[in-house]
Image: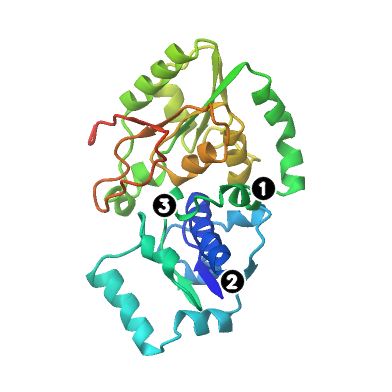
Amino acid sequence: MIIIRLNGGLGNQLFQYAAAYSLASKNNDLLKIDVAGYQTDTNQKQIYRNLDIADFLISAEIASPVEVKKTKNRWGSFSKLMRLFRQKILKLYYVDWHPAILNQVGNIYLDGYFQSEKYFLGRVDRIVEEFTLKTDLYKEIEPIVNGIQSKPISVSLHIRRGDYAENPKTMKHHLVCDVRYYERAIKYMQQKFPSLHLFIFSDDPDWVKKNLSLGEYTTFISSSKGIKNSLRPSQELVLMSKCNHHIISNSSFSWWGAYLNQSASKTVLVPDIWNNGYIAQPNIAPEEWVRFPVVKGA
């Protein structure tokens, strides 16, 4: 049995699930998910997230507490000591590409972030099927999908701020892309696709409106602060994927919004710096994506 500990927001959940699904497929083994971290009483040390991956047609079932304990601690106290050593001493959180992950066999408990497509290359079609939005949730956004697809050329622009700009703990690790990154990226897309229409996705649309000149051909998908947005994160991510091209931030959320667009002709602009340097992530962007310059500390 393969059990994956889901942790963080939707983008992280998708990376974790995809890596574990790939290993389970390779081993012809059963995959289950550990969702204990999404119970309010056990999730107080981090920003609370919802189990948004449940909005998709994933095939894995939730592991029972007994199954988690048996798989997580298959060598008893030695398993606990090894986890402590890897995390506290080696600072090994399995964020980037670690090939040895896919060489494991037997009962495996996976705990990491696994932010690289290299974990599931060769199984992308199956991953995309797993990340299909449930029918009722898709029907709710179908009119917006039609609006996006009615434009000759649609470009998603995702601007991540939120805890990146406000939470001191998060700010130590994750940089906020400077406004010039977005300005240059928009200009690049406008020159390449003169008739483009921008679709804005952001956790701070008010900041976007104040700091970026977006032009007439722009539609905000995300609502401003104080205005209830009926869209779920899973729905916004799927809407992002329906655009022809993408400008993403250093966010796993917009990474998946761009990745689930499986068009071979898409252009994706991705920040050339992904974080503040606490962990190297040379494998975060697929080779065909355009690494676009970010000014660190701007």
Q: Which residue does the image show at 37% across and 65% down from the upper left?
A: 100
Amino acid beneath label 1:
Thr
The kind of secondary structure element at disc 3 is loop
* Residue designated by label 3: 115
Between disc 2 and disc 1, whose residue precedes? Answer: 2
* Residue designated by label 1: 132
Amino acid beneath label 3:
Gln
**Where residue 203 sits: x, y (%)?**
48, 38
Q: Quadrant of the N terminus?
A: bottom right
Q: Which residue does the image show at 34% across and 63% down from the upper left?
A: 93
225 and 102: which is toward the camera: 102
In the image, residue 91 sits, relative to residue 63, either above or below, namely above
Farthest residue, direction bottom:
76
Name the disc covering residue 29, or none.
2
Amino acid beneath label 2:
Asp
In the image, residue 227 sits, relative to residue 198, either above or below, namely below
Q: Quadrant of the C terminus?
A: top left
Left or right: 95 as drawn, with respect to 228: left
The kind of secondary structure element at disc 1 is loop
Between disc 3 and disc 2, whose residue precedes? Answer: 2
| Image depth: mark 2 or mark 1 in front | 2
Between disc 1 and disc 3, whose residue precedes? Answer: 3
**Where residue 16 sits: x, y (%)?**
49, 59
Left or right: 146 as drawn, with respect to 76: right
Q: Which residue does the image show at 42% across and 20% down from the upper left?
A: 186
3 and 265: which is toward the camera: 265
- How many numbered discs? 3
**Where residue 248 sits: x, y (%)?**
44, 34
Other residues around mark 3 within 10 Å, as few (<14) / some (14–19) / many (≥20)? many
In the image, residue 175 sits, relative to residue 54, either above or below, namely above
